[in-house]
Amino acid sequence: MIAGGTDLALEITQQLKDLDHLIGLGGVEELQVINEDEDGIYIGAGVTYRAMFHKLEERWPHFGPMLERLGSRQIRNRGTVGGNIGNASPIGDMPPALIALGAELDLDSVDGTRRLPLEDFFHGYKQTDLQPHEFIRGTWIPNPAPDENLFIYKVSKRIDDDISAVLGAFWFKRDGETIKDCRLAFGGMAATPKRASGAEAALRGQPWNADTVAAAIAALELEFEPMTDVRGSAAYRLQVAGNLLRRAFLESTQDTTTTNQPLMVTDYA
């Protein structure tokens, strides 16, 4: 089954694969839905990045700059959120942000629909919880509360049409100056999009200050062993991950932070 085809097509052009049968999903209306209610927003697996852009940005402004840098304009007009999730790439841009928000995934089959937290969908590199008879139907994302914030930062070599070296997505629920709860998710730091549970534990119940952030950054170094490749070394990725968390702290506490400044690889060298 093919939706946007922005990843599957590469198997033809780069790996010279011959795909005998393709089922296009563009005409399946049930996969194109965007449903909103007081609890959250449901985005069908076939909804394109461009179609959902404003719905996400109006709830969580940090989605705007990130989605503007997801692939190229052609990719954003064609690619789908379901495809980005189903591809199960550790450097996909959408999964870390959705995991940070506590999104849930609907998997459908002739046996009915089951829902699971998105973070439980990824088992290993390109390995998921999707069974042979199932397909991704859609993603449910809870609405933000007044005491919640989401920060998303993508670091790549080019501003446009490039894969992330590291993507950090941080959701915070604050009680005044105290971190009541948080979810920190990264792409490019492991074989799957992954939460930083140790860093989260270092933040929960603690005052939102530089010392607490430093403790969380130290925890990051103990729970991730990123790979070294053409986009960055393991040491570089660890440093970037910590600095993105520090950037979120500075952005949330200082008015001088430029929130829409593109992040290049050299920013945190």
Image: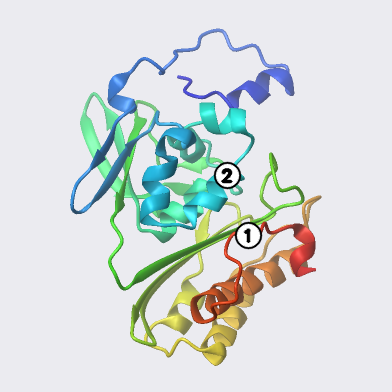
Q: Secondary structure at mark 2?
A: helix
**Residue at the (43%, 60%) spot, across then down:** 100
Place of residue 172 in the rendered image (x, y in percent of width and height, measured from the top left)? 40, 72
Badge count: 2
Above or below, 159 relative to 255: above
Place of residue 17 in the rendered image (x, y in percent of width and height, measured from the top left)? 67, 16
Which of the image's four quarters has the C terminus? bottom right
Place of residue 54 in the rendered image (x, y in percent of width and height, measured from the top left)? 41, 43
Residue matched to label 2: 68
Residue matched to label 1: 189
Nearest the eye: 268 or 113? 268
Q: Secondary structure at mark 1?
A: loop
Q: Residues within 10 Å of mark 2 (few under 14, many from 20)?
A: some
The answer to whether residue 4 is left or right of residue 165 is left
Residue 238 position by quadrant: bottom right
Q: Outermost residue, left direction?
A: 38
Residue 160 position by quadrant: top right
Place of residue 178 in the rendered image (x, y in percent of width and height, measured from the top left)? 38, 87
Nearest the eye: 176 or 222? 176
Above or below, 73 relative to 268: above
Residue 107 position by quadrant: top left
Nearest the eye: 180 or 197? 180
The answer to whether residue 250 is left or right of residue 119 is right
**Residue at the (41%, 89%) spot, across then down:** 206
**Residue at the (62%, 45%) spot, across then down:** 69
Q: Residues within 10 Å of mark 1 (few under 14, many from 20)?
A: many
Above or below, 267 relative to 135: below
Camera-near label (1 vs 2) is: 2
Q: CA distance from mark 1 to mark 2?
A: 22 Å
Label 2 amino acid? Glu
**Between disc 1 and disc 2, whose residue precedes?**
2
